[in-house]
């Protein structure tokens, strides 16, 4: 593992291109790692759930993960592993039973610390980045409507910090080389407030951005099914970078109800996400996820997340992500700040070299088609005659550029 050099890159470049293996071990199949290598991605993200490694109290069995992580290492891939996630399906039944009515922190934290300590000590430096918990700023919405956590795990900020401190200290005490990431669900408006509290109270190395702006449980929702809403990602990354830590997009993908999903939309979403990332100083991205999950039904929005379908057949998004990893595309992202319109209708014209390239809405973003390297004049025009702005910009090979306007 190249732990000491994983963040040494040229300015404006990312060196972490990853994919999440989800719902281990039940969803994993032989050949999955070969498909990640085929992509050109160098990283695998996974959870090491408490439920599967300590089925009996005090008795740890890492055999499945030993084999998997050894195979990942054999393939020349790096590992980002999450520990301490309190999703109900990741917790031992005894822990769920002990905390059925309310979360008993004086009892829960020592047991959590033991599981983290045993896990990190066992794998140690085979894991380049350890993730503490998962989207802990978002527990209420994990309970409703997702049902992924029990109501006892709806946390206030004080409890969030206590749990994160427990996990982070367990990691720090058992590895000196691996880095630690805390990831936040950034569709939740509380993420900046939460991040301020975490950075003030906790010692960690990396901010993980989880972002799903197209997520919707409602089939008829016209807002949350548009793949180009991902372009807000670049602004979220810039805000996270202001906290003076490394930033990784830890989770991103294209969920949609069956009625709104298409492979073309998913591929466009992945393209937009990667292009937005490359206009920032973020260090990497992990796509959620490698394959559609057989444990979910087609009507569930998360069924279609995979770069491969449940039979491991390649989708358009797989090929698009492969191209993005090569970093051979040049686009222009145009950010227009003004009044906020939730409606997706564009009211600002975007011109590239005097030709109308498309529209965006105020407080929105537009992304061009792939362009050749060179100099371009970008102009925007609003619905009022005086709402005109123009700028010059230069595109370099494999380097998308973002330009900001204020109306």
Image (cartoon, rainbow, N blue to C red):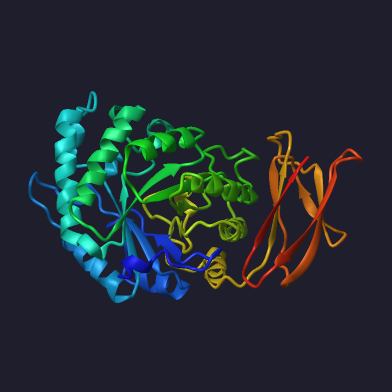
Could you tell me if residue 50 is visible in this image? yes
Residue 355 x %, y %: 86, 60
| Residue found farthest to the left | 58
Q: Tell me the residue at 46%/62% (across/down).
A: 309
Q: Front-most of 310 and 252?
A: 252
Which of the two residues, 295 or 115, is positioned nearer the viewer here? Answer: 115
Rendered location of residue 348, percent (x, y): 80, 45
Q: Quadrant of the C terminus?
A: top right
The residue sitting at the right extreme is: 385
Vertical relation: 315 (above or below) 351: below
Does 270 sit left or right of 115 as displayed? right
Quarter in which the N terminus is drawn = bottom left
For residue 374, what is the image quadrant?
Answer: bottom right
Q: Residue furthest top?
A: 101
Q: Nearer the viewer, residue 7 or 56?
A: 7
Quadrant position of residue 66: bottom left
| Whether residue 297 is visible | no
Above-or-below relation of 380 to 7: above
The residue depicted at 14 percent of the width and 37 percent of the height is 110
Residue at coordinates 24% horizontally, 24% vertically from top-left?
102
Question: Quick check: 268 left or right of 181?
Answer: right
Residue 188: x %, y % from top left: 49, 36
**How many marks on residues?**
0
């Amino acid at each position: 593992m190249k732990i000491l050099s994983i963040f040494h890159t040229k300015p404006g470049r990312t060196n972490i291109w990853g994919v999440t293996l989800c719902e281990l071990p039940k969803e994993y199949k032989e050949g999955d790692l070969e498909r990640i290598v085929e992509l050109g991605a160098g990283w695998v993200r996974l959870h090491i759930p408490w439920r599967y490694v300590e089925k009996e109290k005090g008795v740890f069995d890492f055999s499945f993960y030993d084999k998997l992580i050894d195979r990942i290492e054999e393939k020349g891939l790096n590992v980002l592993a999450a520990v301490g996630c309190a999703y109900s399906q990741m917790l031992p039944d005894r822990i769920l039973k002990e905390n059925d009515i309310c979360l008993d922190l004086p009892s829960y934290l020592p047991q959590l610390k033991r599981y983290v300590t045993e896990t990190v000590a066992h794998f140690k430096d085979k894991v380049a980045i350890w993730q503490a918990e998962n989207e802990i700023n978002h527990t209420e919405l994990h309970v409703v409507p997702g049902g992924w956590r029990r109501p006892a795990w709806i946390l206030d900020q004080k409890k969030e910090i206590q749990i994160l401190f427990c996990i982070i200290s367990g990691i720090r005490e058992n590895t000196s080389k691996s880095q630690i990431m805390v990831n936040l669900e950034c569709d939740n408006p509380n993420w900046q407030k939460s991040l301020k509290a975490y950075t003030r109270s906790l010692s960690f190395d990396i901010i993980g951005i989880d972002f799903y702006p197209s997520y919707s449980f409602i089939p008829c929702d016209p807002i949350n099914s548009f793949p180009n809403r991902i372009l807000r990602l670049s602004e979220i990354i810039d805000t996270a970078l202001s906290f003076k830590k490394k930033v990784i997009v830890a989770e991103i993908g294209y969920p949609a109800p069956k009625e709104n999903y298409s492979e073309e939309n998913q591929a466009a979403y992945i393209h937009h996400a990667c292009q937005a990332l490359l206009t920032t100083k973020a260090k990497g991205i992990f796509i959620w996820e490698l394959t559609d999950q057989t444990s979910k039904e087609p009507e569930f929005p998360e069924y279609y997340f995979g770069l491969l379908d449940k039979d491991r057949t390649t989708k358009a998004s797989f090929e698009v992500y492969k191209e993005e990893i090569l970093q051979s595309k040049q686009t222009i992202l145009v950010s227009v700040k003004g009044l906020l319109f939730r409606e997706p209708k564009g009211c600002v014209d975007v011109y590239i070299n005097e030709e109308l390239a498309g529209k965006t809405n105020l407080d929105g973003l537009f992304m061009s088609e792939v362009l050749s390297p060179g100099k371009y004049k970008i102009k925007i025009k609003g619905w009022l005659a005086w709402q005109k702005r123009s700028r010059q910009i230069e595109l370099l090979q494999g380097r998308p550029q973002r330009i900001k306007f204020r109306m």
